[in-house]
């Protein structure tokens, strides 16, 4: 550990200086020797570091989404050159270069945070051993050794013996309980953060090995935190618990406001955006305009959630513009599932198929109506000026049916199979 500490000694002094500055502020409120003053100093250090790492976090999000977009192409390269590893790696690097994607960009926040972690670990280890580090002098060292968080000293570990814990002014039970609770909370926050990423912010339309790797890490990282956590001082556990909670909150904000295309989070976001835009009939914030602009620019490459968003706007008479704004329009064209624009006209209803009994009943009724019409024509045309001598009550309820002439016995009403309809040519007499 001394070798690692010497490697990060260049940042030990700045980290210790930041902690001392925060301690001077919190010490005036809670007292210089309290665990609140030193614990909040560590928490403030984490917040300051994470604020400085926000640009790297944004770059990490973009790199992760770019990697998710390239997963289908990467899978094709792996299948095409599965027997040639060298050619496979060359094609992968060519794909990264053409798309401007760097796989290591997704690890930048963790790599940038590692020096601060080792520097803080070295500072807390010096407090445990009674060694002055950086700007922490003897008086600050004595104050830090007196600080307890819920009865556990900042420099105590889960694996420390009773003699070492008693030297720090605490009991072994208090140290074990506090460190165990913090390790469980640290692992649980890491698991929830990774699970939230996998269940809500992953494109469900693409099944790639990348998703399987992320799913595996969802269970591996909490176990690693639990194993290594028993060797971390209480102050380092405070550091990791704070940074995990910050990451979880930061990720929830990103998923809520800028989700991955094709994910469940995007479906929920576009549903909220649809209600908001249809209510105000415009996009109000810059983020909303950026989302609408990206959806419009995709054209036929939109996913099902984005097509549903465009169709919802069209149905209420709104049209999304290429610059991200929304205006009123007269267009009634909607997009089908394949992205083809169609007109929103009502679908023609197909007539309901009748049964054989219904068709026979309709044919008989039509024949009766035809017979009544022929009988009326035979009696002569009637006009509206002709007055009937016979009262209406005296008229028969039903008209007399005209008998239908039956076909001659030698012929049939329907043509036989293979025989033409209509009058048939007489057969020539056979020659005997």
Image: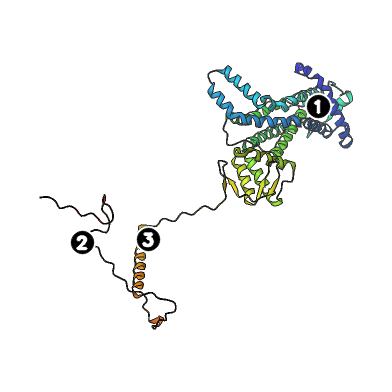
Name the foreground residue: 271 vs 431. Answer: 431
Which corner quadrant of the image does residue 196 belong to? top right
Which labelled disc corresponds to residue 358? 3
Neighbor class of circle 3 (other Cα within 10 Å; few <14, some 14-19, many 20+) is few
Residue 130 position in % (x across, y down) = 83, 22
Res 176 visible: no
118 on left or right of 427:
right
Which corner quadrant of the image does residue 253 belong to? top right
Residue 173 position in % (x across, y down) = 73, 31
Which labelled disc corresponds to residue 245? none
320 on left or right of 133:
left
List the residue tagged with mark 1: 168
Secondary element type, mark 3: helix
Front of the two marks 1 and 3:
3
Up the image or down, 363 lies above or below 214; here it is: below
Gap in Å between the C-alphas at discs 3 and 2? 29 Å
Name the foreground residue: 429 vs 353. Answer: 429
Gap in Å between the C-alphas at discs 2 and 1? 124 Å
Which corner quadrant of the image does residue 47 belong to? top right
Which labelled disc corresponds to residue 409? 2
């Amino acid at each position: 550990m001394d070798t690692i500490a010497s490697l990060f000694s260049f940042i030990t002094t700045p980290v210790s200086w930041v902690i001392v500055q925060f301690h001077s502020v919190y010490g005036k409120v809670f007292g210089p020797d309290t665990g609140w003053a030193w614990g909040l100093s560590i928490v403030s250090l984490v917040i300051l570091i994470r604020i400085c790492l926000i640009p790297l976090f944004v770059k990490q999000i973009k790199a992760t989404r770019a990697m998710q977009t390239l997963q289908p192409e990467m899978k094709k390269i792996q299948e095409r050159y599965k027997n040639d590893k060298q050619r496979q790696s060359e094609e992968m690097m060519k794909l990264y270069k053409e798309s401007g994607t760097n796989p290591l960009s997704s690890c930048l926040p963790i790599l940038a945070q590692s020096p601060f972690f080792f520097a803080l670990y070295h500072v807390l280890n010096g407090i445990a051993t009674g060694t002055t580090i950086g700007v922490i002098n003897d008086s600050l060292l004595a104050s830090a050794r007196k600080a307890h968080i819920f009865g556990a000293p900042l420099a105590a570990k889960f694996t420390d013996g009773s003699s070492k814990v008693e030297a720090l002014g605490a009991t072994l039970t208090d140290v074990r309980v506090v460190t165990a609770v913090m390790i469980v909370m640290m692992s649980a926050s890491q698991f929830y953060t990774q699970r939230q990423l996998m269940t809500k912010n992953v494109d469900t339309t693409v099944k790639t090995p990348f998703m399987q790797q992320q799913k595996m890490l969802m269970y591996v990282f909490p176990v690693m935190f639990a194993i290594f956590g028993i060797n971390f001082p209480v102050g380092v556990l405070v550091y990791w618990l704070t940074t995990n909670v910050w990451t979880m909150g930061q990720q929830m904000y990103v998923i809520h406001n800028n989700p991955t295309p094709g994910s469940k989070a995007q479906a929920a976001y576009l549903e909220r955006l649809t209600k908001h835009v249809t209510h105000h009939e415009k996009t109000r914030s810059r983020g909303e305009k950026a989302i609408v602009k990206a959806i419009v620019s995709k054209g036929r490459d939109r996913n099902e959630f984005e097509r549903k968003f465009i169709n919802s706007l069209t149905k209420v008479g709104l049209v999304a513009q290429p610059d991200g704004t929304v205006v009123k329009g007269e267009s009634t064209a909607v997009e089908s599932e394949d992205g083809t624009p169609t007109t929103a006209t009502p679908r023609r209803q197909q007539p309901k198929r009748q049964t054989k009994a219904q068709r026979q009943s309709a044919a008989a009724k039509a024949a009766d109506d035809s017979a009544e019409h022929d009988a009326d024509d035979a009696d002569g045309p009637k006009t509206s000026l002709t007055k009937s001598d016979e009262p209406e009550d005296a008229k028969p309820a039903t008209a007399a049916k005209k008998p239908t002439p039956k076909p001659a016995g030698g012929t049939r009403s329907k043509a036989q199979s293979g025989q033409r309809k209509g009058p048939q040519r007489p057969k020539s007499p056979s020659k005997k």
